[in-house]
Image (cartoon, rainbow, N blue to C red):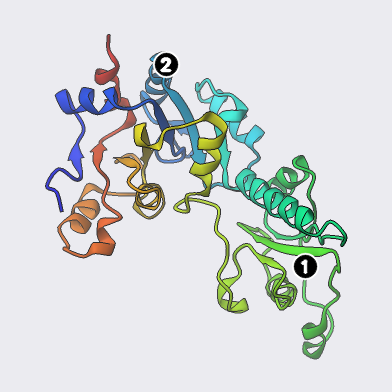
Amino acid sequence: MSAARCAELRGLLLREVLGGVDSVLLDCDGVLWRGGEEVRGASSAVRRLQESGREVLFLTNNSSRTRRAHLLKMRALGFEVREEEVFSSAYCSALYLQNHIQAKTHGQAQARVRDKVYLVGTEAMAQELEAVGIRHTGVGPDPLVGQQGDWANVPLDPEVGAVLVGFDPHFSYMKLNRAMQYLEDPDCLDGAVETAAQREAHKVGKPDRFMVDCAARKFGLDLGRCLMVGDRLDTDILLGANCGGLRTLLTLTGVTALAEALAHRDSGCPERQKLVPDFYVESIADLLPGLEE
């Protein structure tokens, strides 16, 4: 384990690192804002990164908003962002399923593909599915009805070929039960109900690399010249390890204290090393000195 891991990014090191970075991937909540307030200096840092010619993209696991809603919030807080620069778990889930359905359609030209999604999630996730032409069912309350003996045979939509699970304010036993029954069919794609269905889910949000792959394809990124900036070790920083060494920067304006990262670094445990950032700063605003002409 190199002693350079989890180094404070400042001075000459800051300039050296930024000199090798063409693209910056930013987590949002905890890095750019906290609650409804901008992290002091965050919009200035993002604007300066953009003015320097670097690609600045925004990666969030928040599936409660559409990309458009994320965009409006960011602009209200002073960030200049285009919708195509925002990659949310809701949007990337829709892209993943679109690719899956297209691949199955190509492979089953003579048979109808079950291209409907059972969604355990938010209205925002539903809107992102609709935006790429995917039909869905399941949004909203699904209360228990009938007797316990009826629950093992609830009505199922025969056109459903995938189950997608995210944050759902109406999550219930009946939704879990219905998802499990869809997943009894081995051809039904599982988006998250692992324990109950005893199947491994296909994950889309951070720390899975699919979100980064979406951004890389869209913008032609060289991951060797990217920097991932986030405040969570188990999502943003682990993402770096899952992307084959994507460099990572921890900001201390969110949920992680420096002591936690240092404890992982000094643990001697190979798995915990994946949670160690390459660098840290108190705030994203600390990048500004390295961006001065």
Residue furthest top as drawn? 293
At a point 57% along the width and 66% down the height, the residue shown is: 201
Q: Amino acid at mark 2?
A: Gly
- Give me the C-alpha separation between circle 1 and circle 2: 49 Å
Q: Amino acid at mark 1?
A: Asp
Q: Quadrant of residue 46?
A: top left
Q: Is residue 204 left or right of residue 207?
A: right
Residue furthest bottom as drawn? 149
* The C terminus - image quarter: top left
At a point 50% along the width and 36% down the height, the residue shown is: 216
Q: Residues within 10 Å of mark 2 (few under 14, many from 20)?
A: few
Q: Residues within 10 Å of mark 1 (few under 14, many from 20)?
A: some
Q: Is residue 245 left or right of residue 81?
A: left
At a point 82% along the width and 60% down the height, the residue shown is: 113
Sequence-wise first label, 1 or 2:
2
Q: Is residue 64 left or right of residue 7?
A: right
Q: Is residue 248 visible?
A: yes
Q: Quadrant of residue 274?
A: bottom left
At a point 48% along the width and 53% down the height, the residue shown is: 208
* The N terminus - image quarter: bottom left
Q: Which mark is residue 53?
A: 2
Q: Please state which of the two labelled residues, at mark 1 or mark 2, is closer to the viewer.
A: 2
Residue 133 locus on image (x, y percent): 80, 44
Q: Which mark is residue 190?
A: none
Q: Is residue 232 above or below residue 202?
A: above
| Circle 1 residue | 142
**For numbered disc 1, what is the local secondary structure?**
loop
